[in-house]
Amino acid sequence: MRTTPTPRRRAWLAGTAAAATAVALAGVAGPAQAVVELPARIAVIDPPVAGVTYPGIDYGKSDRPGDDRHSKTTWRVVQETGNCCETYLTTTPGGRLLDFGGSFVNYSDDRGQTWRQVQPLTPLVNGEGAIVAAPGGDVLGVEWDPYSGDHLQFYKFEADTAQWLYTEMPVHTPFYDREWIAVVPGPVTIDGQTHEYVSFVKGGFPSKEVWFLSTDGLTYTDVSSKVVDEILHGGEVTGPLPTRGGAVNDWAQPNTNGGMTPLGGGGLLASPDSGTEWGLFDGAEGQWAAYRQPDGSQPSGRFQTDSAGRQHNLVALSGRDSFDYRISADGGLSWQSVSVTLPAGHAIEEVDFRAHRAAGVAAVAIRAQGPDGDQDLVYQLDITGDTPRLARMYEVGLGDTDATGGVGNDVRFDFASVTIFDDGRVAVSFLDSTTKLPSATNPDRNAPAIAIEGDTTLGGKVREEPTVPPELGEPYASYDFEAGAQDWTTAGVPTWSRSQPGVSGDGADDAARFGFGLEGPTQYLDNVDATLTSPPIAAPVGDTMLEFWLKTDTEAGFDGVAAQWSADGQQWRQLGEFSGRTDGYPGWQKVTLGFSSPGGEVQVRFRFTSDLICSALTPGCGEFTGARVDEVVVGSQAG
């Protein structure tokens, strides 16, 4: 549904458009200059290549924890193909792996054993690039090198001639820092001409609102602006995303940090570059419009479109220690999801993902801040069906080196990058104490490298499934909350509160009793992260039980309660997660969970989290009440 902007919004758009136009004119205005296509030289290079093995977890064929097994995966590690701070990876249907993180396009046709480099005539010093596969076997790239004279270059591998070409963009917006590129598989109509595909490039500081458009992958003299189109052509599109299937969708997926998502059939979804509005490019009209989801809300997170035309969405949750991975087969009207929690003590710093329907695999690359250094992780998900399932988690690298994105940091990791081969294996960027890019001034400089997945060997089970459900033995501490909070503490805004009803002996509501709840339109809001934490409890070494009564009514798969325990009050370990409605709702469910106490004092807590949409305040998503906890007992395990 297309609507017209309000007068207030038109005024805001007019100001934004004026600023965007000023930026465009500052860099692009002037006499037209011919774009000359030049052939690039192909040189053999010999970067350091080594084989390593890193641990992981295989989650088996079901959701039962007893299926989880330790694993070891061999990786081919390739260094010195990017720059100080990044690699930028993509693959092609023919099996070619390409990296354009630095000044040059580097590629391998044998999964990283041997390498070639695409070299322009221009002498380059220290650039950064981006690269993406295109329809028909083409490959497109863009590179910016500020140190050799502010060079902005565009690259194309022409499949029909099997040659690499490049062009120079002599005039562009100033300081074209962190350029991004995306291909839009067609048909796309521009100025009355229909094209198999077009490509967009954006970059610059302080805004990337002004994009360059090309219909041949090399000539970027047309300027495109989302906010300008919205003013000139009007309106806002609200409804399902107009996705279309096609084999090329599995390959023409750009890095998600660029906020440019091809939809198939000439469409593109774009995250905001100026203001807060998402944009939708209509290839039939060659125009942009503001975009809202079917429920009227803004999109959130990262997106990709697979060859079946399905939308994939990754959203990092509050606290950034977990994420939701979602699939929609109807343009966003409905979603199927899985929630993934990072290893204890880790939080997302950088993320990228791809979704390859033909291979049946999605891959999420995460640079995670950890207690002993940043750890690179890859989560592999099974996407053969419309409900994603976590299949494996890989640790990549030693996890012993902190790195921070941005100019001025000694060790930098500016963004994550991952790509998927046709057999479902991945290549991913990572950084640890062993990955180097020597320079004249720093021969021991750390920099990102590439890890290319090899074979995986499964080991023993991560945990054994108990044959008999554990039962509570001797209580160490009991809490009914009738006389008060009993030294339990809360955190977060909004947060848990002691209130009525509590639970009766048969699991029903008892209006005269107390428990703790997080519910209703004043507490169960979007983007909540609230904890209810016990006082320290003396627990001997050995099998320990947490027993409690719980009732939840939340957005299934997105909002809910996690039961956790800790031996130091800092590192919390997950015992169980509860989302949607508990068994027997509106009655209460009795829950018993086990863990191994190291001896001394332990604490337990209940953590309620919600995502950015659908809570008690948004009945259009469903009428949710929230969560309640009562009658908490920590004790020994019987028998």
Image: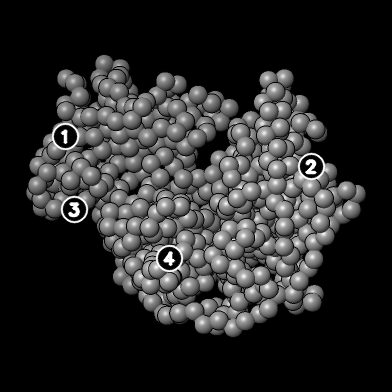
- Is residue 313 or residue 477 the one in the foreground? 313
Q: How much space separates mark 1 and mark 4, taking CA atoms?
A: 44 Å
Q: Position of residue 64 (x, y in %)?
A: 38, 56
Q: Residues within 10 Å of mark 2 (few under 14, many from 20)?
A: many
Query: Which residue corresponds to mark 4?
Result: 447
Mark found first going from the N terminus, 3 or 2: 2
Q: Which mark is residue 596?
A: 3
Whether residue 587 is visible, yes or no, is: no
Quadrant hosting residue 7: top right
Numbered disc in front, either 1 or 4? 4
Q: Is residue 536 above or below residue 618?
A: below
Q: How much space separates mark 2 and mark 1, taking CA atoms?
A: 59 Å
User: In the rendered structure, are the residues bearing label 1 and label 4 in contact, judged by CB atoms less than 8 Å apart?
Assistant: no
Q: Is residue 421 above or below residue 402?
A: below
Please name the residue shown 33% across and 72% down the image: 459
Q: Which quadrant of the figure contains the N terminus?
A: top right
Q: Position of residue 334 (x, y in %)?
A: 61, 41
Q: Secondary structure at mark 4?
A: loop
Query: Which residue corresponds to mark 1?
Result: 535
Mark found first going from the N terminus, 1 or 3: 1
Q: Residues within 10 Å of mark 1 (few under 14, many from 20)?
A: some
Mark found first going from the N terminus, 4 or 2: 2
Numbered disc in front, either 1 or 3? 1
